[in-house]
Image (cartoon, rainbow, N blue to C red):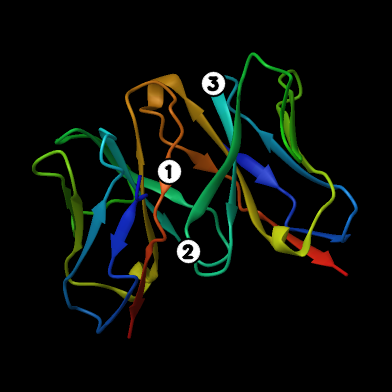
Amino acid sequence: DTGVSQNPRHKITKRGQNVTFRCDPISEHNRLYWYRQTLGQGPEFLTYFQNEAQLEKSRLLSDRFSAERPKGSFSTLEIQRTEQGDSAMYLCASSFGGGNQPQHFGDGTRLSIL
Amino acid sequence: GEDVEQSLFLSVREGDSSVINCTYTDSSSTYLYWYKQEPGAGLQLLTYIFSNMDMKQDQRLTVLLNKKDKHLSLRIADTQTGDSAIYFCAESTTGGGNKLTFGTGTQLKVEL
């Protein structure tokens, strides 16, 4: 069990650029979640996948955001035309099975928009 | 709607017990979780409790749940400097894909 892995750990970009983050979940976990955490706040849910199917998206996920999990393993989160307000920590979590199996988090990708 | 509240800050002396409190509003919550976050890191799962339980103990950690008052607490016995971190309470509901709703976090500072 190598844990949830996220890359890159930090991303600095100029406003208006596109960015993509990657998450590799724990290998046998079929559920994968994305959260966003701004300074001084708790994480907020963005979206989740069960296998390759994206089952729910938060209202926080504007149409500039897209997430994929093409083979039910790793996932990518892309932000197009980044804005200052996108600066945050993006956290990925995974869990096994349905129900309420606990989610295990990666160390996150910190995005800074210049 | 779902809302989770925590006090922002707690300071204790090394060796004392710490008690971090949390209140939630969603009566359909099924599981409640405690996560720990150190600076620049992700969230580490500490423990969780099913909503039909009153208490759960795991080594130095004790979770108490008062479902009537929608109040959850985390007690850390013999608090150490390595326990200094932000602690998040989170809830999930069965019908919500198990997505978590987090509180704003309680910063625990352990002083010598």
Q: Chain of mark 3?
A: B
The residue singled out by tag 1 in the image is A104
- Asked if residue A78 is positioned above or below residue A93 in the image, the reply reads below
Residue B108 on image: x %, y %: 74, 59
- Element at badge 1? strand
Q: Chain of mark 2?
A: A
The dot on residue A38 is: 2
Assess disc 2: are there few (<14), some (14-19) or many (≥20) residues with their C-alpha within 10 Å of its C-alpha: some
Query: The N terminus of chain A lies in which quarter of the figure?
Result: top left
Q: Can residue B1 be seen?
A: no
Tag in front: 2 or 1: 1
Q: Residue furthest top?
A: B52
Which of the 4 image quadrants contains residue A37?
Answer: bottom left
Query: The C terminus of chain A lies in which quarter of the figure?
Result: bottom left
Three-letter amino acid code at disc 1?
Answer: His
Three-letter amino acid code at disc 2?
Answer: Thr
Q: Residue at x 54, y 53 (%)?
A: A42
- The tag earlier along the polypeptide, 2 or 1, is 2
